[in-house]
Each structure stands twice: as C-alpha cells, then as structure tokens.
Amino acid sequence: MTENVSHTTDGDAERTTPGVSEASHRFGITLEDYLLPARGRISMMAPDGSLIPAGEHGTAPGHEYPRPSNERLLAAYEQLVLGRRINDQNAALVRQGRMAVYPSSHGQEACQVTVAMALEKRDWLFPTYRDTVAVIARGVDPNEVMTSFRGEWHQGYDPHEHNTSVEATPLTTQLLHAVGVAHAARLRGEDTVVIALCGDGATSEGDFHEALNFAAVFNLPVIFFVQNNGYAISVPLSAQSVAPSLAHKAVGYGMAGERVDGNDTMALLSVLDRAVALARGGSGPLLIEAETYRMQAHTNADDDTRYRESKEVVAWRAKDPLLRLRAYLVNEGLLTEADEERMAAKAEETASALRDAMNADITPDPLELFDYVFTEPTPQLLEQRAMLADELARDEEAKQEASK
C-alpha cells in the first residue's frame, strides 16, 4: 500500500490549528483530504429502505462511517413517529387559530432527531425556529416549546434545564451564541460539545462567516449543522450559492466539512456521532451539510406553490425519512405491529396533551413585557412600565364605573 503523503507546506501547516493537523495525521490522510468533504454524499440506506452496498456509501479514506446499531435506529424511529405527529398537530392548531405561526419540519425530522441523539446531556444545542422536533427530542415538554409560537410568553422552557437554547427566529444569530458557549466551556476546561443548527439560507449571512471563523481560529468544539432543505423561504439554493456544496465552505475557514443524505437516519447518526467524537477530542469545529427537503410551506403564511412545482414535492415524498427507516426496520424484522401501535399511541397522547394546552384560554399580563429585557431594568424601561401600569389601572377603573 502506498503511504499517503501530505502536500501541505510548512506555511500552510502553521496557519491551521493543532487539532485539525493532528486529526489528519491520525487518519493517515493529507490536511486537504481531511478538510474537504468526501466526494460522494454519505448515504447508507436507499429510499426504499434497502441497504446501500458499502462501496457506494460515498465515503473516502479518513471519512469512513460504521453503521449504527439497530437499537439506536429503533429509538430514532420512535422519535420520528413522535416528531411527525407533532408537526402535523401543530399545523392543524395554526389553522384553528390556536397558534399564531408554525414553521413545520415535516420531511426533515431525521435531521432533528439524530442531532439530539448524538449529543450527551452535558452538551448544548442551539436550534432555529424550525427545529421544534430537535428541542423536544432533547427532553423539553412539547407544551412548553409551543408557548412561544402561540405568542403567549417570551419562551416556554428554561434553556439551562436541558442545555438547549431558545429557538432563534433571526437568521444565524444562534451560531454566534453557540460559539460563545463553546468558547466559555473551553476556558473552563469542560469537554462540552455544541451543535448549532441552521438552514441553507443562513449560510449567506454575515453572522455565519463570523461564527465559523471564530470557531476555527480558537479550535472550538462546535458542529455547524446545515439543514439544506432547498429553499431560503422562496429563494432556491441555486440563487444563493454556486459552491460545489455548502459543505465545501468549511475548508475556507480551516475546518472539516462533510455532506450527508439528510433523509437517511442511518447515515445521519453515523456522521453526527463521528463529528461529536472529533469535536470532543480536540479536533476543532466541523461543518455538516444535510441534504433534505421542506415538504410543507415555509410557514402557514407562505404560499409555496408560487415558487416550486408540485411535482418536485411529490418526488421528495418518495424519499420520506420516516417511511424509509420504517421499511428498513420492517424488512429486518426489527419493528413489530405491537411496536408501531405503542409508538403511535404515545405520539397521539402527546398530540392530545398539546391540543388541550393550546386550547386553554389564557389571561396574559402586559407588564411581563418589561420583566425579562434586562437583568437590571433601565430607567427608561421602568418609566415605560409605569406608564403602561397607569394606563391599565385607568382602564380598569373605567370598566368598574361603567358596570355600576
């Protein structure tokens, strides 16, 4: 066998972090081969649930991925069933006027579930507004997650309880927060790994550049996980970037990149497990692009028929991650009817509790608007609060007078 010889010059090596250089040496490949994604998209399971031959996984030397255990795949499937039911229930609640808005991840649930499964409890997740299923898979109560979409409160769950940040609506701001948490953990000597989620549209934002560059320069244990669902609202990827893949953006920052089939739960688990192990071991940040598809509209306020053909959506339905994994498990004799009935019943129980929570009337306190803006309220904020409190008091007095 011919030994891999690095073509990296001494000057190039000096500009990389020790973690990246050590990782490439450990795998016995050049620095360039470590940083660049494998030429093929990593995939292990065909849309019909059959296994893809090992030689066709899209791997390369130093980019090998073992198949996850069947136990983990069964656990992932149960989370997929729950995630799909929650997505569909939330879409119905929006139509009923019980939630103001909901960005569905129907069709992207495999990305969400596997991200949560790859992390340890001590690790951190930074989601976007479309990552509800990932947040729930981290153990957050679905009813608490949905309060923000209902417009009821600032945020329904405590991020520190589950090491899961709030779902960020502004594009890419959560990436900077994720880098900050990873940097703080490194300074404290902790082995925390952080996964920051974003979409393909976020890769066009300036914050994306700043987050990746900072993470690479300081060799931070952050995994930037891009769910490339084809559209940034109505803008297709072809109008956003002409890079060979979004994963190729990684090399420009001096971090490793990889591209994976985002509807293949098996491949996702394997790629994310390896990424977490590398980040925890000091190899620095990584960028993973998962190619998936947003089956439903951007939100309930979006008309997706104006920018994509229905035949495109139909073609992607054949690649449904839930049906793909189910077919594999059934074919392997790993999923019984009793299992499916139990999983469906559990998912329906969650959906029922969600309906009850969203259908319950609430009496919001307008003064709460001022309670969590700053740790120490500014004089201006206190003045505004006092003005509103006075106005509310006068309104109440007027109502009481009118009722006499």
Image (spheres, helix red, strand yellow):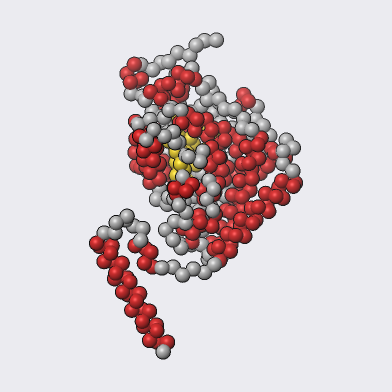
Residue ranking furthest to the bottom: 404
Q: Quadrant of the C terminus?
A: bottom left
Residue ranking furthest to the top: 1
Residue at x-position 58% and y-position 62%? 355
Residue 297 vs 316, above or below: the answer is: below
Residue at x-position 73% and y-position 35%? 332
The answer to whether residue 74 is left or right of residue 185 is right
Horizontal and vertical percent position of residue 331: 73, 37
Q: Nearer the viewer, residue 392 or 308?
A: 392
Q: How many callouts does the rendering have?
A: 0
Residue at x-position 45% and y-position 21%? 24
Horizontal and vertical percent position of residue 327: 69, 40
Q: Nearer the viewer, residue 306 or 28?
A: 28
Residue ranking furthest to the left: 379
Q: Is residue 233 visible?
A: no
Q: Is residue 282 visible?
A: yes
Residue at x-position 31% and y-position 67%? 385
Residue 44 vs 300, above or below: the answer is: above
Q: Quadrant of the N terminus?
A: top right
Q: Nearer the viewer, residue 151 or 210?
A: 151
Horizontal and vertical percent position of residue 284: 41, 29
Q: Quadrant of residue 35?
A: top left
Horizontal and vertical percent position of residue 22: 42, 21
Q: Quadrant of residue 174?
A: top left
